[in-house]
Image: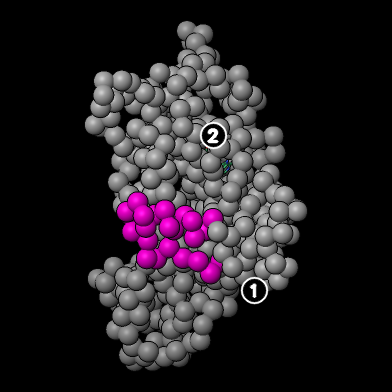
């Protein structure tokens, strides 16, 4: 991609309305454009990154056997009246009337809609479990939309729903999502800690929020810091293995402020292991049994001829919020350097030619390099403008491709001036650069 042809409107300075670094960077490099309070258009750079995040989320859902569907953004109020949440949800729900004067709404979440789909087709325990998910826009008329897309009114969410025959089976499903969340956030190069949390308007009594540490986060957390040393690498999709994984995490104190109890915290966690800090909630999972299936009549035939209401859970990831969360975790705002994890980087590498007047050689060399990169599935962004080299590097540091090649005096013959952002500059041949990037990509 040539920068001169791109729609990446970069601002010289940080926009004054943005209070946290993710919001600043997103406006500064033109990833998003506000349409109205808490509602944004996604411009090419931001959209590209969000789509890459979405792909990883999708792959990890598919790996645990969840099936993708797409439910509408606009829902009928009838199903919400059945579940009893039409009145409970309050002013956060955007209510709409159609031309027939029917009450409609812009979905803030989809428990009712998916239960309605389930009950109309699945009648027997033999068809269980069912894990369904979609990735769709939501609307919540938040009192205080802020920090850009972090707390938007319109936002992009992956929401999954599980249907099982018993509590025991439902917890197996819950644990599959628990694992898939740990794997998803790891691939996004984030350390997200599962924390016992309140269930709020979704309901139920078992719930975990997945939180990444960030000073600017809205969630207050209280935890035993040893939980950060855990990983789920050896967990398999089997009952015992999943059970052990969740137990391993639950063995450490980790809660949000709604669940915090000072006495308990100080009793269980020794002083040097206590961590009280803030974080960003990037995912939230719930188990609520028959809360929706009972009120909406979603039951299945059991082996002995009896019927029972299915046991359900729901599982959310804030896909649009993750764009901001990754910036909060990775952006060095003092030096104005963003390094996107290779798994979601908008471009793999930046090519920065030093272009002299009446001399096309640097640009020709750059195009040749780009052709070689393309053959190897490496996507580059090329600064073909005639700005000076330091402002070009500044721009590329904000765009955040994780690698850079400067095609100038120090790139002679076969040896190119190459660096991984944040690392040392090396003079190496293109073949070596391709090998380095390909190896890193393959290990994601
Ligand atoms: C779980 C899936 C639910 O809605 N129903 C379906 C359940 N959970 S939740 O915690 O309310 O939301 C899931 C995730 O969505 C993100 N999120 C937001 N992102 C941006 N702006 C918002 N206003 C917003 N509200 C929620 C969070 O990442 C949350 O974990």
Query: Does the magenta segment cover residue 231?
Result: yes
| Residue 304 percent across, percent down from the top left | 26, 24
Q: Magenta residues, as a range?
A: 228-250
Is 173 on the left or on the right of 128, as rendered? Answer: right
As measured in the structure, the alpha-carbon distance from the residue carrying label 1 to the one carrying label 2 is: 45 Å
Mark 1 surroundings: few (<14), some (14-19) or many (≥20) residues within 10 A: few
Which residue, given by chain and number where applicable, does mark 1 sit on?
A: 335
Residue located beneath label 2 in the image: 204
Q: Secondary structure at mark 2?
A: loop
Which label sits in the foreground, 1 or 2? 2
Q: Is residue 194 above or below residue 135?
A: below
Q: Are marks 1 and 2 in contact (CB under 8 Å)?
A: no
Q: Residue at x 49, y 56 (%)?
A: 247
- The answer to whether the beta carbon of the residue marked 1 is less than 8 Å from any atom of ligand 1 is no
Is disc 2 surrounded by few (<14), some (14 to 19) or many (20+) residues within 10 Å? some
Quadrant containing the N terminus is bottom left
Q: Is residue 218 above or below residue 159?
A: below
Instruction: Check the image and report above or below for 247 versus 83.
Output: below
Rendered-image quadrant of the C terminus:
bottom left
Residue plotted at (75% across, 53% down): 262
Residue drawn where x is 56% and y is 22% of the image: 85
Instruction: Please check the rendered image and state whether residue 283 is part of the magenta-colored stretch, yes or no.
Output: no
Instruction: Find the residue positioned furthest to the right.
Output: 263
Q: Earlier in the sequence, mark 1 or mark 2?
A: 2
**Disc assigned to residue 382:** none
The residue closer to the viewer here, 92 or 249, is: 249
Residue 75: x %, y % from top left: 46, 23
Query: Residue 286, image x and y in percent?
Result: 50, 40
Q: Residue at x 44, y 89 (%)?
A: 426
Say which element carries label 1.
Answer: loop
């Amino acid at each position: 991609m040539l920068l001169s042809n791109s729609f990446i409107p970069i601002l010289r300075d940080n926009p004054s309305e943005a209070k946290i670094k993710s919001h600043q960077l997103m406006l500064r490099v033109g990833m998003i454009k506000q349409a109205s309070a808490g509602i944004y258009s996604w411009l090419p750079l931001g959209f590209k990154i969000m789509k890459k995040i979405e792909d990883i989320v999708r792959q990890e859902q598919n790996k645990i056997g969840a099936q993708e569907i797409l439910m509408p953004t606009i829902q009928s109020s009838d199903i919400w009246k059945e579940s009893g949440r039409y009145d409970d949800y309050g002013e956060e729900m955007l209510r709409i009337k159609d031309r027939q004067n029917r009450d409609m709404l812009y979905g803030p979440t989809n428990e009712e809609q998916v239960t309605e789909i389930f009950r109309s087709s699945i009648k027997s325990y033999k068809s269980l479990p069912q894990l369904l998910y979609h990735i769709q826009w939501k609307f919540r008329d938040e009192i205080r939309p802020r920090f850009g897309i972090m707390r938007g009114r319109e936002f992009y969410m992956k929401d999954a729903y599980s249907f099982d025959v018993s509590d025991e089976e439902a917890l197996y499903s819950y644990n599959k999502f628990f694992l898939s969340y740990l794997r998803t956030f790891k691939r996004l190069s984030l350390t997200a800690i599962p924390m016992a949390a309140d269930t709020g308007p979704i309901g139920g009594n078992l719930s975990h929020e997945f939180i990444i540490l960030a000073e600017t986060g809205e969630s207050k957390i209280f935890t035993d810091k040893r939980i950060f040393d855990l990983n789920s690498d050896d967990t398999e999709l089997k009952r015992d293995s999943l059970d052990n994984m969740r137990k391993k995490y639950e063995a450490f104190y980790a809660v949000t402020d709604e669940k915090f109890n000072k006495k308990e915290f100080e009793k269980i966690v020794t002083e040097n292991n206590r961590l009280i800090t803030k974080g960003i909630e990037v995912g939230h999972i719930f188990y609520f049994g028959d809360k929706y299936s009972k009120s909406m009549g979603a039951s299945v035939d059991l082996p002995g001829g009896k019927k029972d209401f299915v046991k359900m859970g729901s599982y959310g990831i804030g896909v649009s919020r993750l764009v901001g969360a990754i910036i909060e975790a990775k952006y060095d705002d003092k030096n104005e350097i963003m390094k996107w994890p290779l798994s979601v980087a908008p471009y793999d590498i930046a090519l920065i030619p030093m272009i002299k007047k009446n001399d096309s050689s640097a640009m020709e060399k750059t195009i040749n390099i780009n052709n070689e990169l393309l053959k190897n599935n490496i996507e580059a962004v090329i600064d073909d403008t005639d700005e000076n080299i330091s402002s070009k590097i500044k721009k590329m540091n904000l765009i955040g491709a994780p690698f850079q090649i400067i095609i100038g005096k120090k790139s002679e013959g076969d040896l190119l001036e190459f660096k991984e952002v944040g690392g040392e500059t090396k003079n190496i041949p293109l073949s070596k650069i391709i090998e380095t990037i390909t190896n890193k990509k393959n290990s994601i």
